[in-house]
Amino acid sequence: MTRVLVVDDEPQIRRALSINLRARGYEVDAAASGEEALQRAAARVPDLVVLDLGLPGIDGVEVIRGLRGWTTVPIVVLSVRDQERDKVAALDAGADDYVTKPFGMGELLARLRAALRRAAPVGEGEPAAVETPDFVLDLSAKRALKGGEEVRLTPTEWHLVEVLVRHQGKLVAQRRLLPEVWGPQYESETNYLRVFMTQIRRKLEPDPAHPRYFITEPGMGYRFEAGQPGE
């Protein structure tokens, strides 16, 4: 059974989310603060986290950073904050998606399903691994190795990498990447792509300011070039 950790300081939202998720077959843990969320996640590792940002004590962004120190579990932010800077801060810290309150339960559930799909193992027919001169992507195990050390990528970062790798050497347009990774309602959210591509480059590129693998085609999209081992 898929375990979801719901973190929100508003009792009515925790209750509504718990009821709706349990009705659809999810197992639910709930927390009212950032500290409690980190404790519960460590005691019973969730498959997905639904997280409010405006929490008492530790702020939601700090909770994301705390979780990302040891897990790549999908994190969907649920917040009243609707400014782009708040969305970018959460995504930059390691969140996989951002839903603004008030929200429709149907849309939220669709976002959660999408986040879980992105975290699922790669399907048959996909390349098992891609080797570059600077890192190796084990797509079956969703692991990246750089200099012999594992690099943690979030489920959304992995999904972006996988889409680009499947089209190696070809331009993948922004209008195709956004709906494929986040859904059709994100077609104009180009800031999402910028944030996640920056994170991917920071983690994998030898010189993130001058990428050689994850290439931007200005105004159009992105392209992955693997190069050749030994180059």
Image: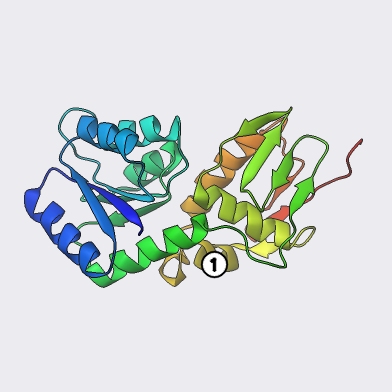
Quarter of the image that includes the N terminus = bottom left
Relative horizontal placement of residue 229, taking residue 148 as reference (left or right): right
Relative horizontal placement of residue 109, taking residue 215 as reference (left or right): left
Camera-side residue: 115 or 28?
A: 28
Query: Residue pushed farthest left?
Result: 12
Q: Can you say whether 55 is above or below 149 in the image?
A: below
**Nearest the eye: 227 or 7:** 7
Does residue 59 show up?
Answer: no
Q: Quadrant of residue 8?
A: top left
Q: Residue at x 72, y 39 (%)?
A: 211
Residue at left offset 57%, top offset 57%: 121
| Residue 87 at x, y percent in the picture | 36, 46
Q: Quadrant of the C terminus?
A: top right
Residue 143 sits in quarter: top right
Q: Amino acid at mark 1?
A: Glu
Instruction: Looking at the picture, tell me which residue is in the foreground, 175 or 108.
Output: 108
Identify the residue at horizontal 78%, vertical 34% (top origin): 134
Q: How is the image coloured?
A: rainbow
Q: Secondary structure at mark 1?
A: helix
Q: Which residue is mark 1?
A: 180
Above/below status of 75 relative to 70: below
Looking at the image, can residue 48 be seen?
Answer: yes
The location of residue 126, given as percent across then percent down, is: 71, 63
Mark 1 burial class by Cα count in 10 Å: few <14, some 14-19, many 20+: some
Q: How many marks?
A: 1
Q: Residue 157's spot in the image, x, y percent?
A: 55, 48
The residue at the far right in this view is 230
Q: Residue at x 38, y 35 (%)?
A: 67
Residue 18 lies in what quarter of the image? bottom left
Side (left or right) of 167 relative to 227? left
Measured as percent of width and height from the top left, residue 225 is found at 79, 50
